[in-house]
Image (spheres, grey):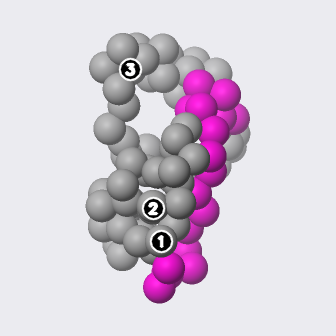
Amino acid sequence: SGKGHFTLELVQRCNFVTAIEIDHKLCKTTENKLVDHDNYQVLNKDISQFKFPKNQSYKIFGNIPYNISTDIIRKIVFD
């Protein structure tokens, strides 16, 4: 979720958004930015530990840190 700028754009355009952020302070920053919306959840966790839904359609948007991008893409595709 970072500072919430991109997440805000998604929340304004999507039915529901799940934002994942490892940094607790950035989670709070994002939640404060989205206070006027109710179609989101901000999860304070490491994306490498997130269990992506099975048998459900969804889209993934993100600004994945370069040093973990390959691992995250493998997890999304193969888990």
Residue appearing at x 48%, y 22% in the figure:
72
Is 73 placed above or below 31 here? above
Figure quadrant of the C terminus: top right
Mark sitting earlier along the chain (3/1): 1
Residue appearing at x 35%, y 72% in the figure:
13
Which residue is situated farthest in the bottom direction here?
36
Residue 77 in view of the camera: no
Look at discs 3 and 1 and give the one toward the viewer.
Answer: 1
* Relative image position of residue 50 (x, y in whole percent): 65, 34
Give the CA separation, mark 2 to mark 1. Answer: 5 Å
- Residue range in magenta is 35-51
Q: Locate residue 79 relative to residue 12 in the image: left or right.
A: right
User: Any mark on residue 32, and which?
Assistant: 1
Residue appearing at x 62%, y 46% in the figure:
44
Give the CA separation, mark 3 to mark 1. Answer: 27 Å
- Name the secondary structure under disc 3: helix
Residue that badge 3 annotates: 69
Disc 2 to disc 1: CB gap under 8 Å: yes
- Name the secondary structure under disc 1: helix
Residue appearing at x 36%, y 42% in the figure:
62
Residue that badge 2 annotates: 30
- Name the secondary structure under disc 2: helix
Q: Locate residue 24 relative to residue 60 in the image: left or right.
A: right
Number of labels in the image equals 3
Is 15 placed above or below 49 here? below
User: Any mark on residue 61, and which?
Assistant: none
Query: For the residue marked with disc 3, what is the amino acid?
Result: Ser
